[in-house]
Image: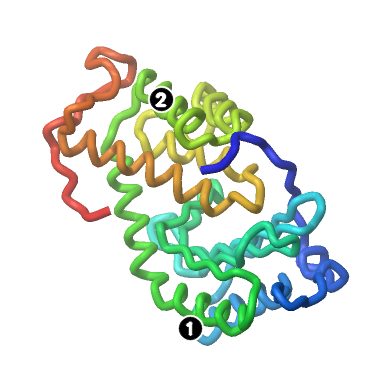
Amino acid sequence: MRQAKFSPRKKVDFQEATDPDLVPEKTETYTPLSNLEVIRQVRNKAGRMGYDISMERYLMNKKRSQFFGTFVLENEEGGISSQIGVCNSYDKTRSAIVALGASVHRCSNLSFSTFKKFRKHTGDVHGDFEDMVENAFGRVEDETQRIRQRYNLLREVDLNDEDAAYLLGRLLYDLQVPVTLVNATKKSLLNDDFVFGNDTWFDFHMHLTDALKESHPRNMVEDHITTEEMLVGEAKARMNGADRQLGNPNAHRMTRVSGRTASMDV
């Protein structure tokens, strides 16, 4: 995913996110895309496609050179709404990104599907970014349904202590999630009063996505996509009776599910 280094970020309002003084000058090799244009493109396309936006949230790094925003759509079903995620930068550290995902209403946790489009800040980045946003809105319903199917799969796999330890280890060593975020996930898992519970892999996912709210704007989309892909891949292997079986049959909170077959394409 990236080097395991935690970077500071902060929540910002619309005025700070769209400060025109932050936008760099255009050069022969660099074409800036303002955060204001990014936000307006999403708002305008939502209106033209018949979607209302129920919530907008913005994050920036402390230098205000990197931006991440989410736009939750008013299409809630089963406690989950679609959302559009966008990334932008003024320091040439990353491309402009549009991603599709979902928002869980009870906790405002984020989730992103594998749909992600990106464009470097060169040439006609403005026109290409508009096309990216249009493409994303054209796939909103299909991708949100796909996320619901993934969530249903995770709900079918019971979580035990050995599973949790294994998954935390994969986050830390294989995916290089910053130790601060892995520790936050572990801490909330051990908190019996926490809102998510600790009975299924979906519960683990909710603890994780809550911790990932503290991800750096530069890494937010990739963090969610990569960690969810890992969880779903492991869950599908478990449901399909793969050779590697996590946990101990007698471990705490464990109910064996091997032998069942995942019925959905997630």
Tell us which disc is closer to us: 1 or 2.
Answer: 2
On screen, residue 10 above or below 135: above
Residue 21: x, y in percent?
A: 87, 70
Labels 1 and 2: the sequence-earlier one: 1
Front residue of 163/64: it is: 64
The residue singled out by tag 2 in the image is 164
- Placement of 118 over or under 213, stated as above or below: below
Secondary structure under badge 1? loop
Per the image, the residue denoted by label 1 is 49
Q: Residue furthest left?
A: 259
Most foreground residue, 200 or 111: 111
Find numbered disc 2 in the image and state the secondary structure of the residue it sits on. Answer: helix
Taking the image as shown, residue 165 lies to the left or right of residue 15, namely: left
> Residue 75, percent across and down?
45, 69
Dot 2 surroundings within 10 Å: few (below 14), some, or many (20 or more)? many
**In the picture, residue 89 is in which quadrant?**
bottom right
With 64 as the anchor, is 165 left or right in this view?
left
Where 24 sits versus 209, above or below? below
Instruction: Name the residue rendered at 29%, 19% in the picture.
Output: 247
Tell me where residue 57 appears, x and y as whole percent: 66, 60
Residue visible at 22% across and 55% down in the picture: 265
| Mark 1: few/some/many CA within 10 Å (<14, 14-19, 20+) | few
